[in-house]
Amino acid sequence: MQYVLFTDNLSDLAIDECCREVKRAGFDGLDITMRPGGHVPPEQAEMKLSAARQAADAAGIAIPMASTAVTSAESPHAEDVFAAAAHYGVRRLKLGYWGYQPFGKIQEQLDATRRQLASVVALGKKHHVLPCVHIHSGNVLSNNGPITYLLLKDFAPDEVGAYVDPMHMTAEGGVEGWRIGLDLLAPWVALVGVKNFRWRETERDAHGQLRFRTEYVPLADGQAPLPDFFACLRQIGYDGVVSLHSEYKGGGSFRRLDTPELLQQSTEDLRYLKTVV
């Protein structure tokens, strides 16, 4: 496995400092943000990714993947993002998200999204970069394994990848839905994103129904069954990039951490993760 740290929550660090801190925390590299507000803004993809590549080389770490906002070949600066990624050896790109529209339109949405995805696949072939669809819970079309399978099933695994995520797949998949989704997606699994969560009570709605929300917690403390998830990954032979998503800033976290605390928690999470992988 190659362990990388998602840089979304390290946006307060310059890229050279980010590289040094990620190396110090024990990671092999970066899952760098190549999207608006990220370390590599799409409109400056070539120049900023060049600087990031130099900083990573100086720190002795890799940049095997990046997280983008691209959802079609017509997305702003999509060509620039793919070209820069290819130039600097970033061979896997997380795509952006297609929102789930009002109830009753799912089949139309799947058809439209597959057409957009086909345009991204063509861009990936042109630049020899693999676009990957991330599973993310909530009001997102690719919010579980079976729906993501429906998006990918007509494409070859060397054309587009599945970016599986035990937290989001458990939140939407309950007790065993995450496993069924992973089973369906096995040929396409190209990236793994790791975080964990628990359900937290919020308030009752107008009918008196108690509501819950997800809350990010340290990997060992959450409800996503990471040992079971990685046992399935071993069974399908996955040994690629694992991106740790340290979502410990803001109101969605078990505790609001500052950057030094986040890096320390990431070190502890990585240590735990290696015991279950």
Image: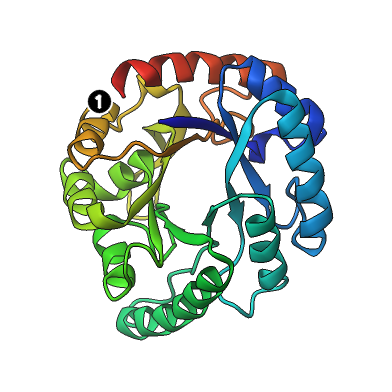
Q: Nearer the viewer, residue 127 or 113?
A: 127
Horizontal and vertical percent for residue 17?
79, 26
Query: Residue at coordinates 41% horizontally, 64% vertically from top-left?
Result: 160
State the image quarter where residue 247 is shown. Answer: top right
Q: Is residue 217 above or below residue 181?
A: above
Query: Residue at coordinates 41% horizontally, 77% vertically from top-left?
Result: 102
In the figure, is residue 249 to the left or right of 136? right
Amino acid residing under circle 1: Pro
State the image quarter where residue 126 is shown. Answer: bottom right
Horizontal and vertical percent for residue 262?
62, 21
Quadrant position of the N terminus in the picture:
top left
Q: Can you see residue 226?
A: yes
Q: Can you see residue 13?
A: no
Q: Nearer the viewer, residue 22 or 142?
A: 22
In the figure, is residue 168 to the left or right of 185? right
Quadrant position of the C terminus in the picture:
top left
Query: Residue at coordinates 23% horizontally, 34% vertically from top-left?
Result: 234
In the figure, is residue 158 to the left or right of 170? right
SS under mark 1: helix
Q: Is residue 27 above or below residue 102?
A: above
Horizontal and vertical percent for residue 213?
42, 41
State the image quarter where residue 82 is shown. Answer: bottom right
Q: Nearer the viewer, residue 173 or 92?
A: 92
Q: Is residue 95 above or below residue 67?
A: below
In the figure, is residue 58 to the left or right of 106? right
Q: Residue under label 1, please give it.
A: 227
Horizontal and vertical percent for residue 125?
50, 71
Query: Residue at coordinates 68% horizontally, 65% vertically from top-left?
Result: 83
